[in-house]
Image (tube, helix red, strand yellow):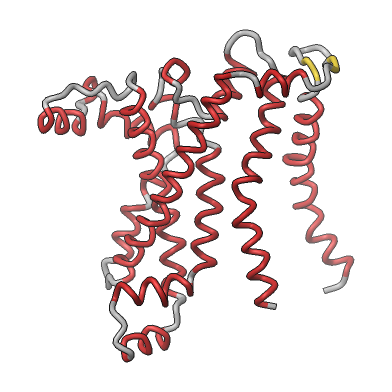
Amino acid sequence: MRKREFALLVAPSMIVMLGLLVIPLYRTMVWSFQQVEYGSPGEFIGLENYTAALTDPRFHRAVLFTIGLTLIVTAALVVLGYIIATLINQLGRWRPVVLGIMLVSYVLPNVVGAAAFSWLFDTNFGGVANYLISSLTGAEILWFTDVWPNRIMIILDTVWHLLPFAMLIILAGLQGVPNEILEAAKIDGVSSLKSHLYVIIPTIRGVLFFVTLISIMDVLRTFDQLIPLAPQAVEIGNESIMLYIYNIAFREGSEQLGLGSAISVLTILLILTMLFPFIRDTFRESKVAR
């Protein structure tokens, strides 16, 4: 392919990326050093926004909540995704039906799925899960106002929403494992558990890294599902970083766009920090493959 043809093919995508990614990122970084009010130019205030964010206990709670949610959900997605993908990989003609049913939760808009999920725990809408748990334990659980019950509900909803994607990617990786390797392990008398631990998982390690990367990025950006699931998020400390940015920059009357921009920059640094080990290993594997 000639350089001119390559440039013509790549140019539209680069223009879109410039308009939707680079320019907003540049404006966010500029505003993070300014006191910005809507409809007026920003006033440079140096690092005051970053100082305000880093010394705000509410921001600390949001960071801890988001990191904890990310670690728990990502681990659950990788483990459950692998187990379910292994089971589905053994199905025959029913595989498309099962996959179609499981993908429903993923294709639903996040806030719609979260609202429907919350009805399982809301007595005003039947509250089937709440009724069963209360019947078995005899305790009345306040899922929307108590800290840990609310966190459990958020974790369950996030796993329910993202699990089909993780499962589907891992399933594609399992189908790419050479049969010769599996047959050789069986001939050598390797048990099913050891076959997964020492043969299959190392073979699809790159796929599992990819699922982990995408899961971390998705969970760190948790926002819209908290609106129906955690209406008291600020009061009980279950506010994610993204919800905190939205509340600070747009919702709570003061519209501190500069402070919200500073927190956005800090969030980008947090995401890069959490992804760095996986990105580093991916680059190492690509070098070895070459």
Residue 267 falls in which quadrant of the image? top right
Up-down relation of residue 157 to residue 285 (above or below) = above
Q: Is residue 128 visible?
A: yes
- Count of marks, rendered view: 0
Of all residues shown, which one is farthest toward the top?
253
Rendered location of residue 290, percent (x, y) = 70, 78
Residue at point 68%, 33% (across, down): 266
Q: Nearer the viewer, residue 67 or 212?
A: 67
Residue at point 61%, 8% (across, down): 253
Q: Is residue 226 left or right of residue 97?
A: right
Q: Nearer the viewer, residue 82 or 111?
A: 82
Of all residues shown, which one is farthest toward the right?
4
Residue at point 41%, 66% (across, down): 171
Q: Is residue 248 left or right of residue 28?
A: left
Rendered location of residue 259, percent (x, y) = 70, 20
Up-down relation of residue 9 to residue 235 (above or below) = below
Residue 197 falls in which quadrant of the image? bottom left
- Quadrant assignment for the N terminus: bottom right
Rendered location of residue 269, percent (x, y) = 68, 39
Q: Is residue 107 visible?
A: no
Rendered location of residue 133, percent (x, y) = 17, 32
Up-down relation of residue 78 to residue 244 (above or below) = below
